Amino acid sequence: MKHYHSMKHWLKLDPQEQQARITAALEHNIDFKHKTSLGIPASKLDSKVFYDQAPFLKDAPFLQAIVQNPNHIGCHTLGESEHYFAGTQAIEREVIHMLCEDIFGAEENSYDGYIASGGTEANIQAVWMYRNLFINEYKARPEEILLLASEDTHYSVAKASNLLQIRHRSVPVDRDSRQIDLNALDQIVSEEKNKGKKYIIVISNVGTTMFGSIDNPDDYARVLAQHGLNFKVHMDAAFGGFIYPLVAGDHNVGFKNPHVSSITLDAHKMLQAPYGTGVFLSRKGLINNVYTKEAQYVNGMDITLCGSRSGANAIAVWMIMKTYGPYGWLEKLNTLLYRTDRCCYHLDLCGVRYYRHPKMNIITIRAEDMPASLAEEFGLVPDTHDGAANWYKIVVMEHVEIEMLKAFTDKLEAYCKQNKTQ
């Protein structure tokens, strides 16, 4: 990959180098046992319950971090932070640099970001940030703001609409291509403009939950600009962020695209980090709109939805990315894409209809082309658990090996042959 040569922060480190770096960071954090600190409402994990003298801990830096329990409250790319945990906060800052500059093409120091609790929080953080931006800078009234996303968008957008009391419109997509229906988008925008909507928050997908489909953010930008509306685009790359930008070559879902202002990722999906490890990234000058000035006892600005959060999760992301490096990660992705390709080849032989983006590791099969019993046997996920399914999806993660996929397609082929002879 041509852009891999210009990786500035994402470099492979061997386990000894990683351990030395994390140990040094933890030593730079507060030592509750040896430093007088009477006022901090925190401590390391309770040693009566979580034994912190186990000899294996010295060779397990992630577990060391969990035991020492660093709090990464706030956003460490912006202003001051709680200095008691400065050592491990620096590691989180490096993760944000790797993601923004090396994966999403941001200019140096042109962004902010933090490790969130997951994609849901990061999406809500984005909507909160833009709602406040429109209110602060343009004196917008809440009823003048619209939340716009495709019908394949994650349910966290409906949560954001409900929590922040912003009207949400869902844009239809084509059944086969899963691309946004541009005529429907234009009609929805026209309707909402006539009802007094002036400010639009767009959630554009990089790998939808059910289909792995990729929205084109420029489609939204073009239609909204034609209508003369003020808008901001947030990319929900919770699933696709750690795969699509790395295998797609040239793409428009990162910070090189002037329309893109913020991005969600989930390290606990493709990266296999512990659950509770999402990521929120945004351009400079935006996240200040959610500064909570009432949190004055916190050193630095509290501008995150979750407040206190575990520094160990940031260390997990850093360790995974540094263990693989960009080339090792690309090898892993290509292995998953090869398995996905092989499965699609056999589905084609069966004549089964499905959706699959060629640069993604999700295959979504039409329910009418396969028996529900087979979906249940192999653990495919339906698009709804409430009534009859329309689609079943396969997500080719590391544990989903070719042998498993072949066993599934063999049974599906037998079913298809039987149906043809009847």
Image (cartoon, rainbow, N blue to C red):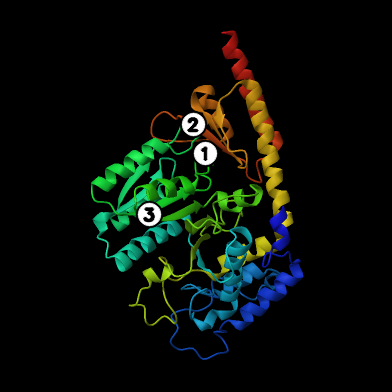
Q: Position of residue 55 (x, y in %)?
A: 70, 73
Q: Which callout, 1 or 2, points at the residue further toward the start of the chain?
A: 1
SS category of the residue bearing label 2: strand
- Which one is in front, 55 or 66? 66
Q: Amino acid at mark 3?
A: Ile
Q: Position of residue 223 (x, y in %)?
A: 40, 45
Q: Which callout, 2 or 3, points at the residue further toward the start of the chain?
A: 3
The residue that mark 1 highlights is 211
Left or right for 396, reference 129: right
Tell me the CA gap for discs 1 and 3: 23 Å
Q: Where is the C terminus found, in terms of image quarters? A: top right
- Which one is in front, 111 or 116? 111
- Which one is in front, 229 or 404? 229
Residue 201, labelled with which disc? 3
Tell me the CA gap for discs 2 and 3: 29 Å
Tell me the CA gap for discs 1 and 2: 9 Å
Q: Decide: marks 1, 2 in contact (CB < 8 A)?
A: yes
User: For residue 404, what is the image quadrant?
Assistant: top right
The residue that mark 2 highlights is 391
Q: Position of residue 155 (x, y in %)?
A: 40, 47
Q: Decide: marks 1, 3 in contact (CB < 8 A)?
A: no
SS category of the residue bearing label 3: strand
Q: Amino acid at mark 2?
A: Trp
